[in-house]
Image (tube, grey):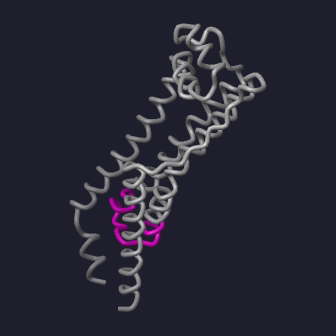
């Protein structure tokens, strides 16, 4: 038990843990409040920007947006469709928030002296798996937004947008997830060694 005891005694680790909690949970607050503020106070501009993202796949939307001078005066989604678009827009943010919540919980446990614990191992494992899966969330949300938008579009102009790509950002997220899972496995092995002694 010397490894765990020596780590528990360090007050520096407690401060580092608290800083990690503050950083992780501050990012959650800023991301969610920023997006909510955008949708609350600039809904028209947010909807127009979203429509421009789909305009390349629909001549109807391209014409409506061009005629409206970028203001979408010719076309505006109905309230239920707008609510669907807003809700879907929050899914990637909520997914990222869940990852940061888990990482923040790891640091919170860290700050109270639970450095190598079963809870910390699980927090890192779940955060890592979610990081690995996160690149799939964005294309799925984009597909669902296109389908939600198609509810209001006339027949023949509906959108089915499906994308799958691999970029350096996607690779970075997957590597982050793998590293968190590896660190979780290291904690598991250390706990097993400690139990063996």
Residue 151 relative to residue 95: left or right: right
Which of 157/145 is in front?
157
Magenta residues span 106-122
Depicted 161 relative to depicted 73: above or below: below
- The residue positioned 59% from the left and 41% from the top of the image is 141
Q: Residue at x 75, y 27 (%)?
A: 156
Image quadrant holding the N terminus, namely bottom left
Q: x%, y% of residue 166?
A: 45, 51
Majority secondary structure in the magenta region: helix
Tell me the quarter of the picture where residue 64 sits.
top right
- Figure label count: 0
- Horizontal and vertical percent position of residue 155: 78, 25
Residue drawn at (25%, 61%), measured in percent from left and top? 13
Q: Nearer the viewer, residue 11 or 75?
A: 75
Say whether residue 109 is magenta: yes
In the image, taking residue 53 as reference, residue 10 lies left or right, namely left
| Image location (x, y in percent) of residue 197 | 35, 91
Compared with residue 45, is residue 119 higher up or lower down, i.e. above or below?
below
Q: Where is residue 192 in the image (x, y as percent from the top left)?
A: 41, 84
Q: In this view, does 73 lie to the left or right of 111?
A: right
Name of the residue lying farthest toward the right: 155
Q: Residue at 74% across / 23% down in the picture?
A: 152
**Relative to 194, residue 36 above or below:** above
Asked if the magenta segment contains residue 13, the reply would be no
């Amino acid at each position: 038990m010397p490894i765990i005891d020596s780590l528990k005694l360090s007050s520096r680790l407690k401060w580092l843990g608290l800083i990690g909690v503050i950083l992780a949970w501050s990012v959650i607050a800023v991301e969610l409040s920023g997006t909510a503020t955008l949708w609350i106070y600039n809904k028209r501009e947010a909807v127009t920007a979203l429509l421009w993202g789909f305009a390349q796949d629909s001549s109807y939307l391209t014409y409506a947006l061009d005629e409206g001078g970028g203001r979408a005066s010719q076309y505006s989604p109905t309230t239920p469709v707008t609510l669907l678009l807003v809700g879907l827009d929050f899914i990637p943010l909520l997914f990222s928030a869940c990852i940061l919540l888990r990482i923040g919980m790891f640091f919170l446990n860290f700050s109270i002296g639970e450095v190598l614990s079963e809870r910390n191992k699980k927090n890192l494992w779940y955060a890592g798996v979610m990081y690995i899966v996160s690149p799939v969330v964005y294309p799925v949300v984009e597909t669902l937004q296109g389908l939600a938008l198609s509810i209001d579009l006339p027949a023949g102009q509906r959108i089915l947008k499906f994308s799958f790509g691999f970029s350096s950002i996607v690779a970075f997220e997957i590597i982050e997830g793998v590293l968190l899972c590896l660190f979780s496995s290291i904690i598991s092995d250390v706990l097993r060694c400690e139990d063996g002694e």
